[in-house]
Amino acid sequence: MADIKKKETGQQWFYSDTVKEHFLHPHNMANEDKLIDEMRPNAMGEVGSPACGDVMKMWLHIDDGRIKKCLWRTFGCASAIASTSVLSEMVTEKGGMTLEEAEKIRPKDIIKRLGGLPPLKVHCSVLGDQALRAAIADYKKKAE
Ligand code: FES
């Protein structure tokens, strides 16, 4: 019993090197307002997590149907920071994803790229994913 508990605890709080790297050196984080001004965002999404009450804001610059730039800011935890950092890379690399491609991303894709997340932290990866969807919806609404 004690072994099982120990094993479960170990699994629950294992952070991959990728999670640690992105938490310590987050990519595309909007830590200064001027970064947001410079990117000329044409879409913005803001969501709160029902699981923990944390908030995520995301700005996109979409050009020719592709996400060229993605900035984000959160009051979320280390897992939310790492998750959204890799998500911002995923949507902007190789010339940027189309909106349709980006809408197909699921939290499990983010977690896979992170090399896993502790089960109790899976909801943190949902925050960036939901903010991305909200920003794409904002862009589509403005384009109507
Ligand atoms: Fe709130 Fe992770 S605990 S985002």
Image (tube, grey):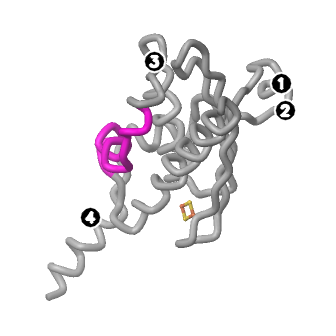
Q: Which residue is mark 4?
A: 11
User: From where the camera sits, is residue 110 visible?
Assistant: yes
The reply to whether discs 1 and 2 touch (Cβ–Cβ < 8 Å) is yes
Q: Nearer the viewer, mark 1 or mark 4?
A: 1
Of callouts 4 and 3, the N-terminal one: 4
Q: Amino acid at mark 4?
A: Gln
Number of residues whose C-alpha sits closer than 10 Å to that of mark 1, classed few (under 14), some (14–19) or many (20 or more): few
**Contact, mark 2 vs mark 3 (Cβ under 8 Å):** no
Locate residue 82 relative to residue 112 in the image: left or right: right
**Mark toward the viewer: 4 or 2:** 2
Circle 2 is placed at which residue position? Answer: 33
**What amino acid type should be assigned to the residue bearing mark 3?**
Glu
Q: Is residue 83 above or below residue 59?
A: below
Residue identified by numbered label 1: 37
Q: Which image quarter is the N terminus in?
A: bottom left
Q: Earlier in the sequence, mark 2 or mark 3?
A: 2
Q: Are marks 1 and 3 in contact (CB under 8 Å)?
A: no
Label 4's element?
helix
> What amino acid is found at the position of numbered circle 2 in the picture?
Asp
In front: 141, or 114? Answer: 141
Q: CA distance from mark 4 to mark 3?
A: 31 Å
Q: Main secondary structure of the magenta part?
A: helix
**Residue 107 falls inside the magenta stretch:** yes
Specify which label sits upstream in the sequence, 1 or 4: 4
Q: Label 4 vs label 2: CA separation?
A: 38 Å
